[in-house]
């Protein structure tokens, strides 16, 4: 672990200590796709145990030594990733995500394999999870204020949206909206206190529920002779304002306005071991993928013409359909310019203590803590349902969901492989996922990969994406979590946990969020 101690040019000056307030950088908006629903007999509800309202907190102000951008010339020995010229393999043997997982205790997966998928209307009582804790140390300070940091003076803001700097984009949107609506000048947007978090997923998503849910197979499609290949993926249409910067192995680095993002292909992970996979063309450039498993289950995914996942369902052999992702694609057809949906939301003010927003596995005593934490509803109300890609790309939207930091799972410099002795550290969170899926088979978990700031930005993006994929592969191969319930995204050094450009273990991490309320309808909300 790196402790980045600043020589304190400001703080030492006798004349005046200069506390620095952490700049609150705000999110970025985007087009709101609303969906065209249809009656769905077995829409899986998601009633969640109440999250107790917590004490109100002020927006985070933290000391922050500047260390966001990674200089291309960090010290070689500590370099976490490769320079831009060698992105795929920053360090020898770094990019092998899933292969290392299989040997790691495959027997550590008791009831996961044969998961009974029950209709969502019947919610079994949660049972205590039984798995070794992923964290080792006893919990420390539990009483930190809502925006307090864990005692590290170099800690970054809690919310990812606060770590971004996009006031210019938000201001542009405000000006445009101000000009288009009633001719009024746009007012600066301040963080909004929305009160305590909603008590359940149903309460959190009440305003976002579609009036009607259409079956994922309802629309007639034209069967394709072959599956989309990498070349088609590279050449596909993209929204205006999106540029392809480069390719790193099987990853594509794109630029969305002021944001650089890594794109990966989840088809290999989704289709592994399938009995059959076929594709159909739908109107307006959409493609429907159907994966048939040996047990008769079908996983049906619809992507819009940009490749974004806008529908995903699991259809059981008896015809029951569990809706994992549901977004009406009409907005995607009308809006040709990428817009961050977070720009339609005011800056977030977190009204709960830090340890109720982020669970750090380092301080987990009881494996059941993962379940109790992940089952909690979002920290604010959801305005509409988003595509999985919108959630991945919008820090402000992601901030709505609480976060588990798997900070006991460590990676070697430049490596995406999980050593055998590390896989067991996923057991606690895997058991929590299993328990949540027993109650609601339509859950979706986002696995985020992060690096420290050593090395090139682009190489770090690709490496962090492979780390997220490695964790997803381990959760599926070792613990039996279905791949369709897992989404992955790498963020490189964009959202540092500790503000330093030096090698820092806390920044080389994987995080998990339960994003179900952001991407799927909740039947019990009606």
Image: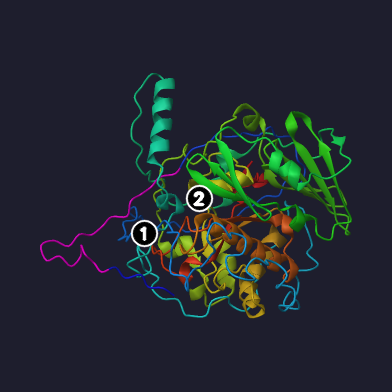
> Disc 2 vs disc 1: Cβ atoms closer than 8 Å?
no
Q: How would you rate the neighbour count of disc 1 (Cα within 10 Å): few for under 14, some for 14-19, many for 20 or more?
A: many
Locate residue 455 relative to residue 474 in the image: left or right: left
- For this rendering, which residue is in front, 259 or 214? 259
Q: Badge 1 is on which residue?
A: 147
Q: Badge 2 is on which residue?
A: 400
Locate residue 85 relative to residue 226 in the image: left or right: left
Magenta: predominant secondary structure element? loop
- For this rendering, which residue is in front, 469 or 226? 226
| Residue drawn at point x = 63 percent, y = 61 percent | 466
Name the quarter where the C terminus is drawn. top right
Locate residue 166 relative to residue 100 in the image: left or right: left
Name the quarter where the N terminus is drawn. bottom left
| Residue drawn at point x = 47 percent, y = 36 percent | 344
Residue 374 position (above or below residue 32): below
Q: Can residue 375 be seen from the camera position used here? A: no
Q: Measure the alpha-carbon separation of dots 2 and 1.
A: 15 Å
> What element does badge 2 sit on?
loop
Membership of 194 in magenta stretch? no
Furthest residue toward top:
183
Label whose residue precedes the other's in the sequence (2 or 1): 1
Residue 321 position (above or below residue 34): below
Residue 274 position (above or below residue 383): below
Measured as percent of width and height from the top left, residue 45 is found at 67, 50
Q: Residue 280 carries which label?
A: none
Q: In which quarter of the image is residue 133?
A: bottom right
- For this rendering, which residue is in front, 121 or 180? 180
| Residue drawn at point x = 72 percent, y = 37 percent | 213
Q: Magenta segment, which residues?
A: 7-27
């Amino acid at each position: 672990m790196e402790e980045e101690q600043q020589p304190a040019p400001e703080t030492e000056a006798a004349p005046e200590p200069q506390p620095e307030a952490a700049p609150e950088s705000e999110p970025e908006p985007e087009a709101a796709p609303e969906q065209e629903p249809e009656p769905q007999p077995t829409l899986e509800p998601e009633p969640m145990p109440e999250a107790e309202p917590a004490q109100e907190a002020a927006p985070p102000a933290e000391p922050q030594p500047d260390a966001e951008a990674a200089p291309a010339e960090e010290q070689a020995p500590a370099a976490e990733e490769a320079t831009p010229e060698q992105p795929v393999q920053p360090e020898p043997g770094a990019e092998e995500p899933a292969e290392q997982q299989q040997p790691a205790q495959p027997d550590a997966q008791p009831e996961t394999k044969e998961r009974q998928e029950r209709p969502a209307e019947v919610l079994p009582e949660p049972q205590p999870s039984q798995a070794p804790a992923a964290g080792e140390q006893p919990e420390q300070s539990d009483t930190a204020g809502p925006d307090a940091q864990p005692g590290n003076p170099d800690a970054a803001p809690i919310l990812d949206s606060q770590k971004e700097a996009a006031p210019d984009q938000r201001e542009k949107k405000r000006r445009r909206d101000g000009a288009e609506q009633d001719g009024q000048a746009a007012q600066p947007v301040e963080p909004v206190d929305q009160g305590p978090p909603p008590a359940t997923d149903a309460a959190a998503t009440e305003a976002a529920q579609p009036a009607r849910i259409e079956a994922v197979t309802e629309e007639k499609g034209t069967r394709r002779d072959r599956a989309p290949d990498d070349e088609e993926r590279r050449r596909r249409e993209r929204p205006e304002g999106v540029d392809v910067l480069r390719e790193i192995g099987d990853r594509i680095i794109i630029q969305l306005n002021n944001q650089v993002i890594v794109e990966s292909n989840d088809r290999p992970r989704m289709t592994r071991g399938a009995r059959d996979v076929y594709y159909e063309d739908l109107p307006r450039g959409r493609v429907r993928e159907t994966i048939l498993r040996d047990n008769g289950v079908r996983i049906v995914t619809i992507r819009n013409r940009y490749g974004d996942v806008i529908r995903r369902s699991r259809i059981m052999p008896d015809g029951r359909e569990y809706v994992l992702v549901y977004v009406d694609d009409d907005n995607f057809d009308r809006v040709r310019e990428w817009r961050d949906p977070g720009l339609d939301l005011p800056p977030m003010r977190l009204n709960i203590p830090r340890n109720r927003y982020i669970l750090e596995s380092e301080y987990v005593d009881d494996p059941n803590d993962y379940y109790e934490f992940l089952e909690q509803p979002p920290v604010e109300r959801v305005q509409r349902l988003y595509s999985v890609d919108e959630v991945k790309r919008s820090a402000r939207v992601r901030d709505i969901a609480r976060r588990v930091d798997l900070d006991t799972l460590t990676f070697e410099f430049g490596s995406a492989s999980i050593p055998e002795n590390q896989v067991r550290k996923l057991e606690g969170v895997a058991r929590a996922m299993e328990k949540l899926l027993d109650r609601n088979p339509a859950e979706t978990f986002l696995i985020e990969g992060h690096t420290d700031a050593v090395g090139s930005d682009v190489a770090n993006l690709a490496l962090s994406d492979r780390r997220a994929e490695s964790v997803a592969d381990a959760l599926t191969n070792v613990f039996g979590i279905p791949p369709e319930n897992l989404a992955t995204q790498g963020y490189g050094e964009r959202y540092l946990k500790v503000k330093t450009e030096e090698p820092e273990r806390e920044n080389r991490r994987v995080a998990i969020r339960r994003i179900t309320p952001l991407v799927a309808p909740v039947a019990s909300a009606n």
